[in-house]
Image: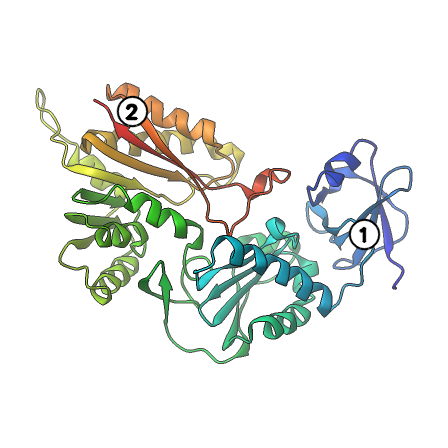
């Protein structure tokens, strides 16, 4: 086995690493016992020279080491194959009927810096860490052996790569792929653009929540805000909603969602409008003095993109969350349900619910929480790594 360069961490840093958190920050390192090149696999020891494990080193990143294992390992194709097979087994256990899902979710699957999404027989790969990026050939070989995919696509246009000193890189890594790809989510037909779509093509983390929220939709007038490709809207329509309106500011998303509704035979009860959600809600709740807003919806879904890029932007984000909930509550009929989500790991569930309660207080509404949501099991949450638990959601019944 190759002799590895050694990184020594400061006193007090070992416990966090041993508990499972894979990031070793620059400030946590006492010294390099032996020189290391960026992208190398290095061994990490505590200040008493006890082995803590091994990971990828990068002096250019704030995260100087991304831990991969607590043992000494041979980092080869077999290593990646074993890790990816273990990750796949989790999905097969908890999402046995899914055909499109996240196979590898970076830290959640002990592969920091690697994401792999499966869309039917096509795989999409993202490498956000230098060490992973340098080993794409090994990763592709392992994926081909496990899945035998029709194609493997690289979608490395994410902003986080610049913090690792990596350029953007998109394209075909293996196989052949052209045009939009038809996929199935919970039995509904979707079409995704794997080359230019959001994320790696679709937001897969809401896959199970689509069906859970749709349980409130039977016979309901439904409003789906920030609808994107219509995940919540289409599931609600299929579940028997009387009518569904989806709102999104992207013209491309609205066109795609409309086409997807047609392909599923749901256009008779499901329509989409292009608009800024904040402006749309404000217009629908605007009334003259001494008039009241007439509630029109039995189920309102709020699934906005992240309002925060960093901790400094949290106060602005909280004002945004309060605003959309305040407007939505005015449009919700008594007995109706508000299903709402936050995908920022900078805003935890307690803080997110506080914004909702502030909106309820200002609108003189009383809410009963009837459900709580997390990301789908293909985006596993490891409590030892708080960053893995970013998506949170609640459903509330409007009591009065």
| Residues at marks 2 and 1, CA–CA distance in whole angstroms | 50 Å
Answer left or right for 239 relative to 78. left
Answer left or right for 170 relative to 223. right
Task: Give the residue at x 52% y 75%.
Answer: 149
Q: Position of residue 226 (x, y in %)?
A: 31, 47
Q: Position of residue 264 (x, y in %)?
A: 24, 64
User: Considering depth in this image, is 316 or 145 the residue closer to the camera?
Assistant: 145
User: Considering depth in this image, is 288 or 6 the residue closer to the camera?
Assistant: 6
Q: Taking the image as drawn, is residue 315 in sight?
A: no
Q: Quadrant of the N terminus?
A: bottom right
Q: Disc 2 marks which residue?
A: 367
Q: What is the total number of numbered labels drawn onto the structure image?
A: 2
Which residue occupies the extreme bottom position in the image?
A: 176
User: Considering depth in this image, is 399 or 353 the residue closer to the camera?
Assistant: 399
Q: Quadrant of residue 272?
A: bottom left
Task: Give the residue at x 16% y 60%.
Answer: 267
Task: Give the residue at x 66% y 52%.
Answer: 110
The residue carrying pointer 2 sits among few (fewer than 14), some (14 to 19) or many (20 or more) residues within 10 Å by Cα, namely many
From what the image shows, is residue 146 above or below residue 109? below
Q: Position of residue 138 (x, y in %)?
A: 68, 70
Q: Quadrant of residue 277?
A: top left
The residue carrying pointer 1 sits among few (fewer than 14), some (14 to 19) or many (20 or more) residues within 10 Å by Cα, namely few
């Amino acid at each position: 086995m190759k002799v590895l360069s050694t990184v020594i961490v400061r006193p007090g840093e070992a416990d966090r690493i041993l508990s499972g958190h894979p990031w070793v920050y620059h400030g946590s390192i006492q010294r390099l016992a032996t020189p290391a090149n960026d992208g190398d696999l290095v061994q990490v020891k505590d200040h008493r020279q006890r082995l803590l494990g091994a990971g990828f080193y990068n002096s250019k990143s704030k995260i100087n080491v991304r831990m991969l294992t607590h043992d000494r390992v041979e980092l080869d194709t077999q290593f990646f194959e074993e890790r990816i097979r273990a990750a796949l087994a989790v999905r097969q256990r908890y999402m046995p009927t899914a055909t499109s899902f996240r196979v590898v979710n970076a830290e959640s699957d002990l592969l920091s810096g690697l994401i792999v999404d499966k869309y039917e027989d096509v795989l999409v790969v993202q490498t956000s860490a230098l060490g992973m990026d340098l080993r794409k050939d090994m990763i592709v070989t392992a994926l081909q052996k496990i899945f035998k995919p029709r194609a493997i696509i690289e979608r490395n246009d994410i902003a986080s790569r610049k913090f690792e000193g990596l350029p953007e890189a998109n394209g075909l890594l293996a196989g052949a792929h052209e045009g939009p790809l038809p996929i199935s989510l919970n039995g509904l037909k979707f079409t995704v653009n794997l080359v230019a779509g959001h994320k790696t093509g679709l937001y897969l983390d809401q896959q199970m929540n689509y069906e859970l929220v749709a349980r409130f939709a039977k016979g309901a007038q439904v409003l789906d805000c920030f609808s994107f490709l219509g995940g919540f809207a289409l599931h609600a329509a299929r579940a028997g909603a009387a009518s569904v309106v989806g709102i999104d500011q992207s013209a491309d998303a609205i066109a795609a969602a409309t086409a997807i509704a047609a392909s599923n035979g749901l256009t008779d009860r499901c329509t989409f409008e292009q608009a800024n959600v904040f402006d749309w809600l404000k217009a629908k709740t605007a009334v003259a003095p001494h008039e009241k807003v007439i509630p029109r919806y039995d189920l309102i879904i709020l699934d906005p993109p992240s309002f925060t890029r960093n901790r400094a932007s949290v106060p602005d984000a909280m004002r945004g969350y309060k605003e959309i909930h305040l407007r939505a509550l005015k449009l919700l009929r008594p007995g109706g349900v508000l299903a709402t989500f936050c995908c920022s790991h900078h805003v935890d569930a307690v803080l997110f619910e506080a914004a909702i309660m502030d909106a309820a207080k200002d609108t003189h509404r009383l809410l009963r929480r009837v459900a709580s949501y997390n990301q789908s099991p293909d985006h596993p949450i490891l409590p030892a790594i708080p960053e893995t638990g970013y998506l949170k959601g609640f459903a509330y019944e409007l009591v009065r």
